Image (cartoon, rainbow, N blue to C red):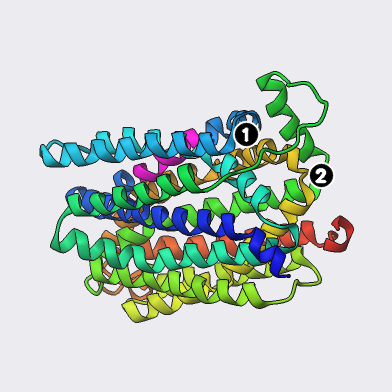
Amino acid sequence: MNKKYTQLKPYLLLWSTQTLSALGSGMTSYALVLWLYLRTGSALQTALLSICSYAPYVVMSVFAGALSDRWDKKRTMLVCDLLAAASTVAVLILIRADALLPWHLYLLNALNGLMNTVQQPAGEVAATLLIPKELYQQTSGLRSFSQSLNSILTPVLATALFAFAGMGWVIAVDLATFGIAFLTLWLLIDIPEAERGEKPREKLLAAAGEGLGWLKRNPLILTLILFLAAINLVASTYDAALPAMVLSKQSGGETALGMVNACMGLATLAGSVLVTFLPAPKNRVRAICLALLFSMSTENFILAFTGSPLAWCVGAVLGWLFIPLMNANMDVIFRTTIPLEMQGRVYACRNTLQFFTIPIGFLLGGALTDRVFEPLMAAQGAGSPLVSLFGAGKGSGAAMLFAVIGVCGVLVCLAFGWVLRKYRWSEFT
């Protein structure tokens, strides 16, 4: 047992420094959402930040995985990190010159999304190469732990720095954390290359097609990916509407939004700790379905029908508590089912199929909030049943959208749960 954990040291070093860098990047992204919404008051313009980040990720992922399987994983991660940091420096320069405009952010977010497209499958394979197989679930819990810890710290630190020191200091912290992670990966971590066997190198399109072909031959993995794609459509619509509601409601504001996001992080932190110590479930597929059903049937309705930050925080806890359980079981299924030499290509195809709904969801959430539900609620009289349900004033339209999102999320979970009911994890071990 001690030998296994000794072998895990390089991964723990990579995980900890990349987590620190992700915290800095998350702070910048969060502060830019505040910066843009406070200047435009538009959910759609704010949602375009995420749309521009995810669009290249979705379009290019299938090819990025094939490239990742060919390229040196460490070098790929270093180059992508360096180019992403350069885009952050560009934002800092534009802020210092008082010349930052929304279209600058859209363009730079697209560049960051492209870098993440190439880096993400390389990072997934690097993790597989560094982690002993018997520790996959525990390390998945660690990743959920770090993500949830960042979810707690990001809104708190970003809001404080943004309010008291300005956007420039948020970016300075981002660049400092990038430097630590970059130097650690460059100088201290050796990532072994996966064995390629005797098979000759394929052309890029053929290699990308192999990832899609593997998914067609493995219906459980493909169905789980499509399930997550539908959930991501609902979740990204939620993400687009959340700032518009919380920042606009009389009981809300920047502090309230920070509290809600911090509670999401606390919930996922608690769930991550739980996953790390829980035994493996007998049926991982069922655990995934139940976790997502609980999430979709709680938070959205609490946000829709209540008007206090305390209730929103309770909703955030209920909605995110079991997400680490879902992520851990999904991660184990993927890592133990997909052959190592195919993981870059299959993960990249997964990214395209699973995440293509995210920019669509952000676009829907922003457009529906600004152009459908907010105007609808603004036209209601004081005695309207809709006002009694969702409140009055700006932000009530976003609250109404949360009710619609909640219904859609529950229906998605029930439909895919019915499709997936025939699969048992024991068939795939």
**Three-letter code, disc 1:** Gly
Point out the tag, 2 or 1, that comes first from the N-terminus. Answer: 1
Residue at the image position 72 percent from the left and 52 percent from the top: 335
Q: Nearer the viewer, residue 11 or 356?
A: 11
Single out the residue that lies furthest toward the right.
Answer: 427
Q: In x, y percent, where is residue 230?
A: 60, 51
Q: Is residue 298 above or below residue 374?
A: below
Which quadrant of the figure contains the N terminus? bottom right
The secondary element bearing badge 2 is classed as: loop
> Along the horizontal axis of the image, is 322 left or right of 283?
left
Q: Is residue 241 above or below residue 351?
A: below
Q: Which marked residue is nearer to the observer: mark 2 or mark 1?
A: 1
Residue topped by disc 2: 218
Q: In x, y percent, where is residue 117?
A: 51, 37
The secondary element bearing badge 1 is classed as: helix
The quarter holding residue 102 reads: top left
Residue topped by disc 1: 65
**Three-letter code, disc 2:** Asn
Q: Which residues are magenta?
A: 47-57
Q: Can the viewer see residue 5?
A: yes
Magenta segment's dominant SS is helix
Q: In x, y percent, where is residue 220?
A: 79, 51
Determine which of the numbered discs, if any, sits on residue 317 in the image.
Answer: none
Single out the residue that lies furthest toward the top.
Answer: 203
Residue at the image position 64 percent from the left and 44 percent from the top: 125
Q: Can the viewer see residue 41?
A: no
How crowded pointer 1 is (Cα within 10 Å; few <14, some 14-19, many 20+) is rated as: many
Residue at the image position 54 percent from the left and 43 percent from the top: 120
Is residue 359 one of those drawn in magenta?
Answer: no
